[in-house]
Amino acid sequence: MKPDARGSERTERAEWIYACILWLYPAEFREAYAAPMRQAFHDALRDKTLPRRALVRLMVRDLITSLLKEYLAMLRDSTFRPALVFNAIILSGIATGLGLALYAIPQHVLRSGLNDPQIQMAGDLAIILDRYGVNDGLRQGALLASGLGTNIDMERSLSPFLMVFNDAGQLLGTNAQLDGQAPIPPKGVFDYVRRHGEERVTWQPQRGVRIAAVVVRVKGPQPGFVLAGRNMREVEARISDVRMMAGLTWLGMLALIVIGTVAFGIYSRPRPSTPIPPVPAKG
Amino acid sequence: MEGMEIITHPEVPLSPAVLAILLSLAEGEKHGYAMMKDARSPRSGGIQMGPGTLYGSIERMMRDGLVEESDRQDDERRRYYRLTTRGRTVLATELARLDAAVSSARSLGLIPSGGQS
């Protein structure tokens, strides 16, 4: 094969490849400019003043930048319309509200449901101690009568436990321990219960150990407090699952809104049927 | 510059590609590759511009009324473009802006005086 024929074949192949690459451009732009772009490339290939290596570099850079620009322009023209943007913002707001509700409602139900046994246990024991007083009541086995196990490990066990305090907040009896000791809740909790009769708190006696506690007031001849608590580990794991599912649902809804907005924007994009006339000069 | 009237235009300042296209078309009707070739020359700023950048810019310039397609057709695939009156005004405004900047640079001694602006 003669060198000229080989060169011509290479040029034709390059033009064919460029024509294929033009399919990467947005359809509207491609329909309008593919033919003159191919012609410009054809002319550039036959320009002896333009070194082949420089042409390749120029074309690669041009393809990357112009493809990006044309797709961004298409997106801008398709979606940056006030009605579309407004709808997308409203839908995103609704999706965010739904996402928050999907997290907040189950979280509240799970967290408040965790207190139910403690409310009953603390109330039952407080009724007995109201009658006998905290010291005498404990001496008569009120704590054992609750039917709960003894020496419950606050960190490992999910069983509810009870603690009885005198009016000064000193521990009188309990069926639970943490690392061999019986921790005492903050004094402020007792002050609050003294004023309001009951408090439901999340108590962290040790890093990583969180207790859902219900504290009630014992009145009568020997006043004091009853605390019923339970490790929150399992419920917090469920709340964490709910948070992840709500977060994924929220992200999914946002992605759908973005995809829908862009798709609808492209579908309903105004296409000028006639060329835009030039703006007449002033004067 | 003192005493110099500053003319403004919404399109000004222009991107290098748009300025190169307007400068090329200021000579008369041109087709795509002729504009690309002109843009590479030092008098148009030495802009390396491929067909994608060229026709992307031309589309936006046509939308802004700076250039228009001419009726001339010597090849089915070759398209010729020309400046509109508005395009010529915008080009003049941009050149005046650049000229003022060059004059200012010269008075500050940043460019040797006596050279072409």
Image (cartoon, coloured by chain):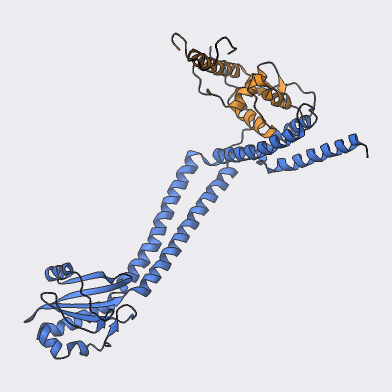
Chain colours: A blue, B orange
Q: Is residue A182 left or right of residue A250?
A: left
The image shows residue A262 at horizontal and vertical percentages of: 55, 46
- Report whether residue A90 is seen: yes
The image shows residue A36 at horizontal and vertical percentages of: 73, 31
Q: Quadrant of residue A152?
A: bottom left
Q: Quadrant of residue A50?
A: top right
Q: Residue at x 60, y 19 (%)?
A: B87
Q: In the displayed structure, would residue B54 be above or below residue B22?
A: below
Q: In the displayed structure, would residue A260 be above or below residue B16?
A: below
Q: Which of the two residues, A213 or A246, is positioned nearer the viewer here? A: A213
Q: Residue at x 65, y 23 (%)?
A: B68
Q: Quadrant of residue A57?
A: top right
Q: In the displayed structure, would residue A267 be above or below residue A135?
A: above
Q: Which residue is at the far right?
A: A1
- Report whether residue A276 is seen: no
Q: Which of the two residues, A224 or B117, is positioned nearer the viewer here? A: B117
Q: Residue at x 36, y 74 (%)?
A: A233
Q: Residue at x 20, y 87 (%)?
A: A143
Q: Quadrant of the N terminus of chain A?
A: top right
